[in-house]
Image: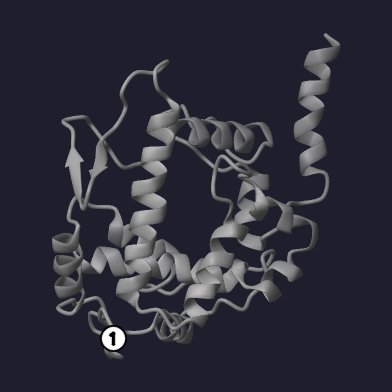
Amino acid sequence: MSTLWAVITAELDDNSFCGDLPDPGIGADMPGETFADWLTGHVDVMRGVDDLWPRHDELDEHSLYVWCANAEDDAETLIAMLGILLLVYRRLGTPGRQADLGDDAELLTEGGGQRVGMSRFYGLLRKRLMANQTIAELLQWIIIDFVIVQHERVATAKLPSSGDTFRFRRVGDALRFFPADAPVGFNDSRFSALSTIAHELGLVSSLSLPRRELTAAGSALLANGDLPAGAVQKAAARFHRENAG
């Protein structure tokens, strides 16, 4: 593990994350709060949750996600993933922004004792940012507590009914890996559930079809950030008719 952190630190100090943008000195020792300030100096995160969020072609969450969606794991990937977390934190995770969410803030508390909810995670992150932890320190914390420990917890809970699902285990100061597939991608159960909801709300044609298209209501939601009047009632009426039949 100590060798892993040394490699990560060296890679962070030799990154090319900024591309054509002026480099503010992003590296292992940059404070996470300073990195967040630099990101939000380029990406507008002050819009409300129901407002249209303006794009930034290089640094907003979608751009950083696309950056990470490849087979190459490097320092830039680590910085981009941390950047996504920091941008969402500034949009939704600070105490002031959570207060602005009203009743919707309950969504961020979901998880309980089984999963780490967003509110809990961002509370822990806030303390570390206030302690002026560096990019390297934040990444080490995330990798240990939310990758390694979470995997061990979930895999242990599946024993013995689901068999051995460990991809790695900690052995002293080392990680022992096992020859088991560990693809990274959409969580199928959640993606299926959410896509079904979007379809049943009348926002999009079925995502199981080769070609998916937005409906008029879905296009209005995308363009305006809100549904046209009566769209949900119209979608629900179809199920009321089916139940009545």
The residue depicted at 26 percent of the width and 78 percent of the height is 28
* Residue at image point 58% right, 31% down: 196
Quadrant occupied by the C terminus? top right
Q: Is residue 3 left or right of residue 113?
A: left
At x 18%, y 79%, the residue is 13
Of 239 and 29, nearer the camera is 29
Residue 35 sits in quarter: bottom left
Q: Extreme right residue here?
A: 244
Residue type beneath disc 1 = Leu
Looking at this rendering, what residue extends furthest in the top direction?
245
List x then y, in percent, for residue 176: 18, 40
Residue in front for this viewpoint, 181 or 232: 181
Name the residue at 54% across, 30% down: 206
Percent position of residue 123, x then y? 59, 66
Instruction: Specify whether 175 is left or right of 156.
Output: left
Please identify the quarter of the rendering in which residue 26 is found.
bottom left
Q: Position of residue 244 (x, y in %)?
A: 86, 12
Q: Quadrant of residue 195?
A: top right
Percent across and percent down for residue 104 are 74, 56
Q: Is residue 124 above or below residue 220?
A: below
Residue 4, above or below 130: above
Residue for badge 1:
21
Q: Is residue 94 visible?
A: yes
Report the side of 14 relative to 198 (left or right). left
Q: Quadrant of the N terminus?
A: bottom left
Q: Is residue 186 visible?
A: no
